[in-house]
Image: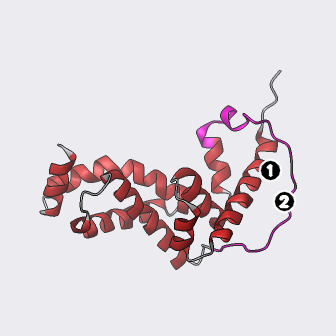
């Protein structure tokens, strides 16, 4: 089924089309939810995200990518969940993370699961800004608006997240012989 036809049928409450949309986007949205809220809460937030997609589908105007719109609904749902659970704390104080040198291609030597484990360990504020900036590609101005913070705070959180990840890489690197 073509995307435009699928959207049209979903807007008309066609249950078959809604099932197709669910099956098409659930894996992508689950990955997003997992990155933001962790594996324990990801399924609940996924369901909330899909409910919002169907609820607000009438507002989709075919401007830009439908997948991008669905992703944005999901990201916003994740952020609202973190705010509601009081888990989204933006750290305004520098921790004085030590600078450690890491091989430039260290990340390329890691599996996706190893990297996800490190990202999962980030404090929620760092993780949210890291996901929005690095993975989703949002500019700091938009991140600041989404999270209700200053642009400088967004930049600071991203820097701290990168330092945290870099620091975490050192013990996980395997020695090659």
Q: Position of residue 83 (x, y in %)?
A: 54, 76
Do tag 2 and tag 1 residues touch (Cβ < 8 Å)? Answer: yes
For marks 2 and 1, give the CA distance: 8 Å
Using a 10 Å C-alpha cutoff, classify the residue at mark 2 as few (fewer than 14 neighbours), some (14 to 19) or many (20 or more): few
Main secondary structure type of the part rendered in magenta: loop
Using a 10 Å C-alpha cutoff, classify the residue at mark 1 as few (fewer than 14 neighbours), some (14 to 19) or many (20 or more): some
Name the residue located 15 percent from the left edge and 50 percent from the top edge: 5
Residue 1 vs residue 137, the one in the foreground: 137
Residue that numbered label 2 is attached to = 97
Q: Position of residue 31 (x, y in %)?
A: 47, 51
Which region shows up in magenta?
89-113
Q: Earlier in the sequence, mark 2 or mark 1?
A: 2
Residue that numbered label 1 is attached to = 167
Q: Position of residue 132 (x, y in %)?
A: 54, 59
Q: Is residue 34 magenta?
A: no
Residue 3 vs residue 175, the one in the foreground: 3
Does the rendering let one see residue 95?
A: yes
Viewed as shown, does residue 177 lie left or right of 64?
right
Which corner quadrant of the image does residue 113 belong to?
top right
Where 80 falls versus 159 (above or below)? below
Viewed as shown, does residue 18 lie left or right of 130?
left
């Amino acid at each position: 089924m073509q995307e435009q036809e699928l959207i049209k049928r979903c807007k008309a409450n066609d249950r078959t089309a809604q099932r197709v949309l669910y099956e098409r986007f659930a894996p992508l949205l689950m990955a997003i939810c997992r990155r933001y809220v962790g594996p324990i809460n990801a399924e609940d937030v996924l369901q909330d995200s899909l409910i919002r997609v169907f609820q607000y589908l009438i507002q989709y105007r075919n401007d830009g990518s439908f997948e991008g719109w669905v992703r944005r609904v999901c990201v916003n749902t994740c952020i609202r969940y973190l705010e509601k659970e009081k888990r989204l704390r933006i750290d305004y104080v520098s921790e004085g993370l030590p600078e450690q040198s890491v091989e430039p291609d260290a990340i390329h030597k890691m599996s996706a699961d190893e990297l996800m484990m490190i990202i999962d360990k980030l404090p929620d504020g760092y993780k949210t800004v890291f996901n929005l900036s690095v993975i989703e590609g949002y500019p700091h101005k938009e991140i600041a608006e989404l999270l209700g913070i200053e642009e400088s705070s967004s930049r600071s959180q991203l820097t701290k997240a990168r330092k945290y990840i870099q620091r975490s890489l050192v013990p996980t690197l395997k020695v090659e012989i």
